[in-house]
Image: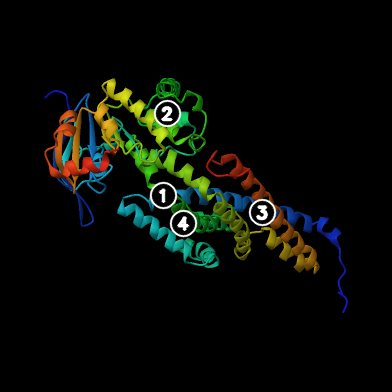
């Protein structure tokens, strides 16, 4: 049976399709990158406090990770979108609902906090892999806890973790597709809209797939460049 | 005594149920080099690590220049008065030698970067690694790394230097270059506490020797007496075992 389908790649460059694609691309890349940066900052913080000697900080860190890691991202998106505003006091809820781009903000919040929990776990594993003597050396030289983590432990752990951080980054990108469920016009949503409007699903989803693959390829290239740049001379043998 | 530097009082340390230090009472004065020796597991390193509270001891106290470590609320500041050198060097692998040496002066001692670097070059000159300033630790030989680690500790301008088996991870020809740096330090009057098995160094350089076993100080004597007439049978046995006889 021959494929009964008329390819019309040109329609992707016609409006409204073109506009949707551009908007979708901008949302996917913007959302993922922003979520990633926020997730890194929160994740490093949470991952680090789980390694400190303070039981309270460790408890906060563990509670955070277990909460955000063990609820599916889709459910978290719905909770932030449907439940969270209801839990706000009335005036705050109205203010929240009047914000521009509520779906986008909600998506950013959900994606960042979810990813941060995963980053925190990687950071914790990275920190655990650092020889105990490094902590001794830093502490014995009079550095405070914060200085020790800031200058010695985190930069060292980060280098060890670049490959894991990279794959987590790719996950954020792909997870961002879920945000179409709360109305974010990202690239998968754009593909869906084009398909519904024109019945040209193959072209539409090809654009979405190529977007994800190209973006992730760029990220992988950038991260291996970064890994090479940050490699510790003499220690990690890579050309 | 005015030049009392470290005063250890009824110090007890446990690792879980294992008692690592058993009621240690001793003191160290400025300008003296004291070697701590004894069989492995005798508590030498534990004692050393209590002097800057890297180990949190459960009982007793250590006074550094009269300041109680137990009651000290700013332990970081107190630690920056004491340099420490480790068996496995523990240089920061992601930093150049220069950055390794200037890190603590800049952040713990709030020195400006140019000041810290100028001082670092003086210290590197002193331990003979000036050419390695911009290299990374893994690009150096073991002996060079340990000398860099000594320079890093000296950069604190410490009142006391702690050495925790500084030559145990080194090849014989590199041991000599590290011991020379340590000898020069001792001769300049740096207060030093050295945990080591290098009895040649102990004999030549140290002022006093402490012998430990099972978490206790068995004997403490000035160096000459320690070798010529050790009191206890345990010290004699130890010396017989450790001093290679041909």
Secondary structure under badge 4?
A: helix
The circle drawn on residue A121 is: 4
Q: Which residue is disc 2 drawn over? A: B102
Q: Residue furthest front?
A: B246
Label 3 to label 4, Cα distance in Å?
Answer: 22 Å
In the image, is residue B161 above or below residue B47? Answer: above
- Measured as percent of width and height from the top left, residue A194 is found at 76, 64
**Could you tell me which chain the residue with mark 1 belongs to?**
A
In whole angstroms, how far apart are the C-alphas of marks 2 and 4?
Answer: 32 Å
User: Which label sits on residue A216?
Assistant: 3
Nearer to us in this view, B83 or A40: B83
Q: Secondary structure at mark 1?
A: helix
Question: Residue at (28%, 32%) from the top-left corner?
Answer: B200
Residue B221 occupies quadrant: top left
Front label number (1 vs 2): 2
Q: If you read the primary sequence from the N terminus, does the residue marked by circle 3 or circle 1 appear first?
A: 1
**Callout count:** 4
Expressed as whole percent of the image width and height from the top left, the position of residue B27 reads: 15, 33
Query: Which callout, 2 or 3, points to the residue nearer the camera?
Result: 2
In x, y percent, where is residue B44? Answer: 24, 42
Disc 2 or disc 4, which is closer to the eye? 2
What residue is pinned by disc 1?
A48
**Do marks 3 and 4 share a chain?**
yes
Q: Quadrant of the N terminus of chain B?
A: top left
Same chain for mark 1 and mark 2? The answer is no
In terms of secondary structure, where does tag 3 sit? Answer: helix
* Nearer to the camera, A174 or A107: A174
Q: What's the chain of the residue with tag 2? A: B
Between B2 and B143, the one lying in front of the other is B143
């Amino acid at each position: 049976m021959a494929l009964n389908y008329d390819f019309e790649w040109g329609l992707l460059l016609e409006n409204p399709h073109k506009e949707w694609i551009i908007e979708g691309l901008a949302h996917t890349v913007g959302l993922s990158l922003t979520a990633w940066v926020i997730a890194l900052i929160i994740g490093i913080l949470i991952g680090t406090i789980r390694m400190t000697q303070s039981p309270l900080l460790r408890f906060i860190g563990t509670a955070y990770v277990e909460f955000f890691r063990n609820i599916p991202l889709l459910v978290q998106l719905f909770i932030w979108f449907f439940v969270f505003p209801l839990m706000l006091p009335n005036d705050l809820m109205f203010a929240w609902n009047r914000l521009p781009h509520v779906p986008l903000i909600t998506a950013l919040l959900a994606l960042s906090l979810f990813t941060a929990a995963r980053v925190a776990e990687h950071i914790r594993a990275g920190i655990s892999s650092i020889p105990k003597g490094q902590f001794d050396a830093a502490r014995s030289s009079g550095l405070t806890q914060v200085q020790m983590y800031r200058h010695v432990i985190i930069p060292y752990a980060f280098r060890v973790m670049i490959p894991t951080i990279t794959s987590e980054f790719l996950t954020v990108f792909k997870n961002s597709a879920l945000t179409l469920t709360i109305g974010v016009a990202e690239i998968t949503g754009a593909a869906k809209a084009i398909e519904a409007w024109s019945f040209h699903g193959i072209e539409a989803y090809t654009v979405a797939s190529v977007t994800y693959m190209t973006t992730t390829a760029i990220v992988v290239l950038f991260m291996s460049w970064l890994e090479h740049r940050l490699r510790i001379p003499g220690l990690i043998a890579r050309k | 005594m005015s030049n009392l530097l470290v005063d250890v009082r009824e110090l007890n340390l446990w690792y879980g149920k294992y008692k690592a230090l058993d009621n240690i009472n001793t003191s160290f004065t400025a300008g003296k080099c004291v070697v701590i020796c004894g069989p492995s597991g005798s508590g030498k390193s534990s004692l050393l690590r209590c002097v800057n509270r890297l180990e949190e001891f459960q009982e007793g106290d250590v006074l550094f220049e009269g300041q109680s470590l137990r009651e000290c609320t700013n332990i970081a500041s107190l630690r920056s008065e004491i340099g420490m050198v480790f068996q496995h060097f523990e240089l920061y692998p992601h930093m150049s030698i220069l950055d390794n040496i200037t890190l603590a002066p800049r952040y713990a001692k709030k020195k400006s970067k140019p000041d810290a670097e100028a001082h670092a070059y003086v210290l590197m000159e002193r331990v003979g690694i000036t050419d390695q300033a911009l290299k990374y630790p893994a690009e150096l030989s073991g002996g060079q790394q340990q000398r860099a680690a000594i320079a890093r500790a000296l950069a604190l301008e410490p009142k006391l230097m702690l050495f925790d088996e500084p030559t145990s991870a080194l090849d014989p020809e590199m041991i000599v270059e590290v011991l020379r740096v340590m000898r020069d330090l001792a001769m300049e009057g740096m207060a030093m506490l050295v945990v080591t098995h290098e009895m040649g160094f102990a004999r030549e350089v140290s002022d006093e020797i402490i012998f430990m076993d099972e978490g206790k100080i068995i004997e403490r004597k000035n160096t000459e007496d320690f070798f010529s007439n050790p009191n206890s049978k345990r010290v004699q046995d130890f010396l017989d075992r450790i001093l290679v006889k041909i």
